[in-house]
Amino acid sequence: MIVREYEKDEITVHKAPLVLMGGIVAISLALTAGVTFGVFERQSVPSEARAAAGIKPEVERTLRFFDEADGTVRVEDGATAEVLGRFAPGEGGFIRATVRSLVHQRRIRDEGPAVPFTLTRWENNTLTLSDPVTGRSVEVSSFGPDNRAVYANLLPARTETR
């Protein structure tokens, strides 16, 4: 039997990737420390930013959402029960997702559907869907123009004043 003895292979790593990874870690720590010590502003909370800028609600509408037996989601005006829209299975995915997240918070708190949700268009043309029961809200405008349009269509049309 022939036995060969091999020299131990030396594992080498180039210095450039190590230096770059170290730089990323150092920058991350520096930015985190900068936010902590007030060098950089923290991420703004939309409601606080609107209050600081003096932005007021332009239009508000209360909404109720219902799951029908065939899987359709029906949206009604919370005050008048007027049907504002229907979204068949496979449609209205954004509405389904946002409302489910808010309803989930109600279920955690053992709250029912008695109080409608509030959809608000602000003076700066952003939209917020909020739940007055839990205090949670979704900044609808943050999800792009197509998703924003789905909710914007549930609000009364703008009237031009001159």
Image: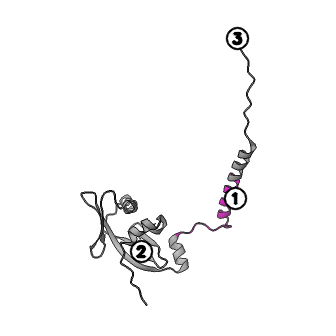
Alpha carbon separation for disc pair 2 and 3:
83 Å
Q: Amino acid at mark 3?
A: Ile
Alpha carbon separation for disc pair 2 and 1:
38 Å
* Magenta-drawn stretch contains 136: no
- Give the residue drawn at x 68%, y 52%: 24
The percent position of residue 69, horizontal first and vertical second, equals 24, 57
**Callout 2: few (<14), some (14-19), or many (20+) C-alpha neighbours within 10 Å?**
many
The quarter of the picture where the N terminus appears is top right
Is residue 18 found left or right of 145 in the rendered image?
right
**Residue located beneath label 2 in the image:** 120
Q: Which mark is residue 2?
A: 3
Of residues 151 and 65, the one nearer the viewer is 151
Give the mark nearest the N terminus, 2 or 1.
Answer: 1
Query: How many callouts does the rendering have?
Result: 3
Q: Which mark is residue 30?
A: 1
The magenta stretch is 25-45
**Callout 1: few (<14), some (14-19), or many (20+) C-alpha neighbours within 10 Å?**
few
The quarter of the picture where the C terminus appears is bottom left
Give the mark nearest the N terminus, 2 or 3.
Answer: 3
Q: Is residue 76 above or below residue 19?
A: below
